[in-house]
Image: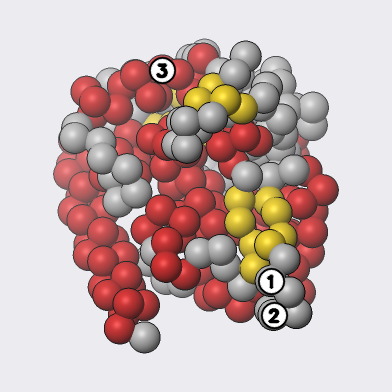
Amino acid sequence: MTIPTSEGTAVATPRWQPLDAAQRRVLGVLIEKAKTTPGGYPMTVNSIVTGCNQKNNRDPITAYDDFDVEKALSELQELGAVKEIDWVGRVPKYKHLAYEWMGVRPVELAVMGELLLRGPQALGELRARAARMEPIEDLAAMKPTVSGLLERRLMIELSPPGRGQIVSHNLYPASELTALRGGQGHAGRGEPATEEGRGGPEPPSAGASIEPGSGATVSPGSGIHAEVAELRAQLERLAARIERLENQGG
């Protein structure tokens, strides 16, 4: 299977596989910054550290240092998800290869980037956050994107379809997927990945929680939850806009 990228070229069969928490955060930051602050992309290690540890649009909040980020970058390069740019004696910079690595289109990559940064979340808040990077008018407009990611097992459903549904990416290692299985699983589309990146246990119910350090806590969806999530996402979009303006001013 080949999929066109944002540059209009075809890409090879996806090579994605499970990532640990640091790898997911670093890849998510590269995806986000490439779309929201292209003037600062590709990124240095220091800028990636800052992006990983920022307070807005991150769950959990982290305190990674240069060593943590450099290690994750090295591992992601070995996996073919990240590339170091040769700046001829200048500070090394890095770019993601996520379009090819996951085999996704621009809107799909925006959705996956948000899931990598925050883990499980309601579709409503996911739509609002991903819209910072690519236009997604409403949940109806997002439905084909979600369906495509579920069919290709890049996304999993953690609660039944409907208002407040919880979803996540499918790049968790087996140990974290075990934690995601707490309670009775919802047999939805998208199977959690094994260490080989395919198949695995059923996803959990909407009330299941993730072990500390894995990225987020899954909570039951509701109408109120969706509305609060939408407001929170709007604040995060404003914070991202301020960040872009500050970068331009600097």
Residue picked out by circle 3: 147
- Find the residue positioned furthest to the bottom: 250
Does residue 213 appear anywhere in the picture?
A: no
Q: Of discs 1 and 3, which sits in the foreground?
A: 1
Q: Locate the C terminus and report the quarter of the image it occupies.
A: bottom left
Q: Amino acid at mark 3?
A: Ser
* Gap in angstroms between the C-alphas marked 1 and 3: 40 Å
Q: Which residue is painted at 57% across and 25% down in the image?
A: 10
Please give the label number shown on residue 42.
Answer: none
x and y percent of residue 22 in the render? Answer: 67, 58
Q: Element at badge 1?
A: loop
Q: Amino acid at mark 2?
A: Arg
x and y percent of residue 198 in the render? Answer: 71, 21
Residue picked out by circle 2: 90
Q: Which residue is painted at 31% across and 65% down in the image?
A: 240
Q: Which residue is painted at 34% across and 19% down in the image?
A: 144
Horizontal side of 8 relative to 96 (left or right) equals left
Residues 212 and 77: in front is 77
Mark 2 residue crowding within 10 angstroms, few (<14) / some (14–19) / many (20+): few
Does residue 102 appear anywhere in the picture?
A: yes
Residue picked out by circle 1: 87
Mark 1 residue crowding within 10 angstroms, few (<14) / some (14–19) / many (20+): few
Of the numbered discs 3 and 2, the one sitting upstream in the chain is: 2
Q: Element at badge 2?
A: loop
Given contact means CB atoms under 8 Å apart, are the residues at marks 3 and 2 in contact?
A: no
Residues 136 and 196: in front is 136
In the rendered image, which quarter is residue 57 located in? bottom left
Horizontal side of 172 relative to 28 (left or right) equals right
